[in-house]
Image: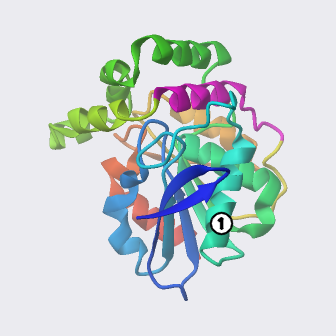
Amino acid sequence: MAFLKENGRTICYRLLGDSAKPLLVLAHPLGMTQGVWDDMLPALLERFRVLTWDLPGHGASASWPKASDEITPEYLAHEALLLVKQAGATSFHFAGTSIGGVIGQQLISQHSDQLLSATLTNTGAVIGTPEAWNQRSANVGKLGLAAMAADIVPRWFGQAACDAEPALLGGWQVIMGRGDGRSYGLLCEMLGRCDFRGRLAGHKLPILLLGGSHDVATPPDTLKTLGEHCDGKVPVILDGIGHVPSVECPDQFCNLLLQHCV
């Protein structure tokens, strides 16, 4: 792991692999950490230099500063580009899941000239409703992340993954519960404001859309709608997979990503 200071706040990241290889930037889902990519790293590092990082208040990255009550997609994209600059790269491949896919949409809409390709998984041009996200933010303030993790984490994974690894839910509940509640709540509120409809077409960029048939957070119809706003891209829907393919089917996801990033 490595650390970078941005406006007095510490960002935790990993920069792995050969600097001569093309850079691949990976953005994790809300409530999780950059550890979601671990099972994919051995195969990815054969082709890429890989950059991962923890979002504000997640993993080992510092909480969002108390002086600010809003996180924006623009800032999260800025954070990604800051780390790309730290890696010494001017262009890169990007893959992001859930809120990581929102970061990808922001990069597509405003920084497509730096992208070699984009892979957006389990995300949407609009995700849920402002009312639902604002209610979740309020609940985090009242109950705390540890209490809420028991209800939220089971929504991340398909039944097959839970059957294959009985400790999966408990492990991720611990990880989510250790995050910063205020940062999480502000990211929820950001998701309630996000609307990328009409902002993703015409960029002439290779885009792969990926979803899971058992994803209750961003179901297949949400990916199909996103595809309509990405010049008619047809998403790949993985059978039996929930919201986090990098954890549930890392080999399958890795193969699709390697085929896409040419």
Q: What element carries label 1?
A: strand
Q: Does the magenta stretch include residue 196?
A: yes
Q: Residues within 10 Å of mark 1 (few under 14, many from 20)?
A: many
Residue drawn at x 32%, y 47% is 248
* Scheme by which the image is coloured: rainbow
Judge from the rendering whether residue 132 lies leftward or rightward of residue 141; answer left or right.
right
- Name the spot of residue 171 as percent of width and height, x first: 23, 38
To which quarter of the image does residue 155 belong? Answer: top left
- Name the spot of residue 173 as percent of width and height, x first: 29, 31
**Which residue is the site of mark 1?**
117
Residue 125 can be seen in this image? yes
- Name the spot of residue 152 as percent of width and height, x first: 38, 24
Q: Does residue 57 sit above or below 23 in this rendering?
A: above
Q: Give the range drawn in magenta.
A: 181-198
Foreground of the two, 220 or 66: 66
Say which amino acid is labelled 1.
Ser
Q: Does residue 80 sit above or below 258 in this rendering?
A: above
Judge from the rendering whether residue 241 lies leftward or rightward of residue 98; answer left or right.
left
Residue 218 can be seen in this image? no
